[in-house]
Image (cartoon, rainbow, N blue to C red):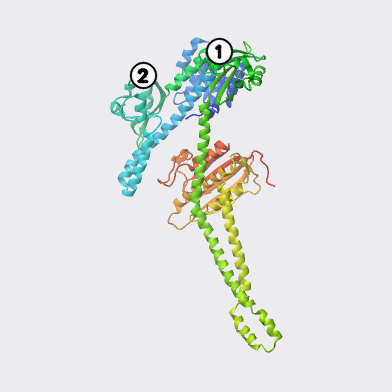
Amino acid sequence: MVSLADILNARILVVDDQEANVRLLEGMLRIAGYTSIESTMDPFKVCELHRKNRYSLILLDLQMPGMDGFQVMEGLKEIEADGYLPVLVITAQPAHQLRALEAGAKDFVSKPFDLAELRARVHNILEVRLLHLETKNYSKVLEETVRELEASREVIRLFDIAEHKAAEERLHVLSDAVEQSPVSIVITDLEGNIEYVNPKATETSGYTFEELKGKNPGILKSGYTSAEEYRKLWATILTGEWRGTFHNKKKNGELFWETASIRPILDASGKPTHYLAVKEDVTARKLAEDKIAWLASFPEQNPNPVIEIEVPSGVVHYVNPVARDLFPDLQQQGLAHAWLAGLEQLAEGLTRADEHEARRDVAVDDRYWARTIQYLPEVRRVRVYGIDITERKLAEEALRQSESQLRLAQKLESIGQLAAGVAHEINTPIQYIGDNATFLAEAFRDLIRFVEPHAELASALRNPGRTDFVTALEQSAPNVDVNYLRDEIPKATAQLLEGVAHVARIVRAMKEFSHPGPAVKAPVDMNRAIESTVLISRNEWKYVADLTTDLDPELPLVSCMGGEFNQVILNLIVNAAHAIGDVVRDSKQKGSIRISTRRDGGWAEVRVSDTGAGIPEGIRARIFTPFFTTKEVGKGTGQGLAMAHSVIVKKHQGTIRFESEIGVGTTFVVRLPLQCVGEKP
C-alpha cells in the first residue's frame, strides 16, 4: 500500500505563467511536507520535463500565452501510453472545468485558491496515482504468477514423483497467493466470459463464484460508466493494457467504485489466451475525498475540532461544537491550553512569511492530535483543524515493536543456525589444546622423575663410597630424553596458547555479532564488524568457497546500527555461499567470495562478490521483494535480502544494489553515508 512518506516524496511539477502563483503553490506544497517540487513558467517545456522526470503530479494552469493547458495535455497523452494523465488543472473559468476533465485531467482547482481544498486534492490525486502505479506493477507480477502456474502444470507431467510433489507445493503456494490477494482478480476467456474470480472479487461484488462463472463482467454495470469508455477498453486490451475506473453495482444494488487494470494473458508464442483483470474497491477513499473537501468549507459540521485564533493577540474567536465538547475550557485558557501548545510562534511565523499553512502534532493527556494550521490573511486569523491520530500513533508504535521483535527473531535464528558451525570451528583448536596439554603433563612427569634424584646425587658426591646410587642414576637417565623435551615443550606451549587465542577470537566475534547493540546509530568500525561476521560464518562457506577480504584501513567510523549491519553482511555472505554451492555441488571444487571496503567521497562502500551462477534477468526486479525466493521449499524464507534493503535504505538512508552476469557471478554493493562521524585515530 501507498504510505504517507511515498506521497510526500512524490515528484510534483508546478506550471503557471505567473511567478506569484508559482511561488504560492510551491510554498503551500512545502508547508504540507512535500519534498520534491519543480516548476516552470514555460508551457512548451512541460512535455520534455515530464518525459525526462515522469512526475507523479502536474499542477497545470489552463490559461497561458503561446500554449494553453489543453494543448499541453494533448502533448502529455503522447508520453503516457496508458492514457493516464497525472494532471490537476488550475483555472478561474468555471466553463473550463468540465472541458479539462474531458481532456484527461484528473481534477481541478478554481482560482483564487482555497488552500484547504488544494491541499486535499493534491494529496488525493497523488495517492490515486501511486496506487495506480502500484496496481500496474502488481498486475505484471500477477501475470507472471499465472504463467508460472501454467508452466508448473507442464512440469508436473514431465517430472518424477519427488519432483511432482515439489511442483505441487509450488502450485499450491502460487494458488494461495492469488486466492488470498487483497485485490479482486478476474480471469475471462477471449469472449469476455468469466472463468475465475478470487474470494476478494466475490466479497466485493456480493455474487458467488457460481453466479459469476460463465457470465460477462457486464453483470456489474450500473449505467454510470459510459459506453464510450467500454469501447476504449476493448480496443486497448486487444494489444495492450487498459487502466481506468468503473462505477459498478453490487448484487444488492449498492453502487461502488473500482480502479482496474486489464491486460491479455499470452501463451509461450505470444498469442492471447485469456484476459486478466486486477481491480481494487476505492469507494471508501472516493467518499472520503468528497467528504474532506466538503468539511473543509464547513467547520461547524466538521466532526473534528476546529478553532480560530486572532493574531497577534492570541484571542480564541471561534470554537466549533466538537472542540467545545472535547475542551470546555479551551476558549477561556486560549494559547495556554495544552491542545494549543506551540501554536503562538507557529502562527507568528505564518503571518510574517509568504506561507499560509503548517502542521504540528500534539499530545494531550492520553490522546495524540494532528493539527493543520491555516493563516486567513483577510481576517488576520489562524484556523486550526485537529484530527485524533491516537490509534495511528499506537499502531505505528506497535509496528515499530513488531519490526524490532522480527529483527531480533531473525538474529536469533541466524545465531541458532551458526551455533553448530561455531562449535565445529571451536572444536579443532580445543582438540590440539587438549593434545598439547596431555603432552605437557607427560613431559612434566618425566622431568620430575629426572630431577627428584638430584638431592641424593649431591649426597653421593660427598660420600665416595655410594657407587651404587651413581650406577642407578646412570641406568635411569636414558629413560628421559631431555633434549627432546627441551625442543618440544616450547612448541607445545606455543600451540596451546595459539589455540586459546583462536578460541577467544571466535567467542569474541560471536559476542560482537549476537550483542543487540544500541537502538540508535553509533560510530561503528565496519572492517572489524565484517571480520567478526566472516569468522563466525566460516562453517557456512569454507566447504564451497575460499573467502578473501580487501578492507580499507583508512575507512572512517560509520554511523549505523552495528547489530543490524552485521546481520546484513551475514545475509550477503550466506547468499553468496549458497549461490556458489549450487554451482560447485558434487564437483569437489571451490568458488570464491571476496569482500572489500572503501571510501567513496561521503560514502562508505562494501562489496560482496561471489562466483555463483548469476541472477537471471527475469527475476532481478524482484530480488528485494519480501518472501521472494528461488530456493527450494524449507531452505529459504525470502526475507534475507528484503531485510537488508529495509535496513540499509529505510533506516540508514543508504543504498543497496547488485551487479550480476550469468555464468560469472554477482556483486552486491552496499553504501552508507559517512555523516562526518570522524576518522580513525
Q: Is residue 554 left or right of residue 153?
A: right
Amino acid type of the residue that numbered disc 2 sits on in the rendered structure: Glu
Outermost residue to the right: 462
Which of 125/95 is in front?
125
Mark drawn on residue 111: 1
Who's the residue at 48% across and 17% down the image? 291
Say what secondary structure mark 2 lies in.
loop
- Residue 269 image position (x, y, % from top left): 35, 37
Q: Nearer the viewer, residue 342 or 526?
A: 342
Name the residue: 45% across, 23% down.
83
Q: Quadrant of residue 488?
A: bottom right
State the SS at label 1: loop
The crowd level at tag 1 (other Cα within 10 Å; few <14, some 14-19, many 20+) is few
Is 26 placed above or below 436 here?
above
Residue occupying the far bottom of the picture: 465
Q: How many marks?
A: 2
Q: Amino acid at mark 1?
A: Lys
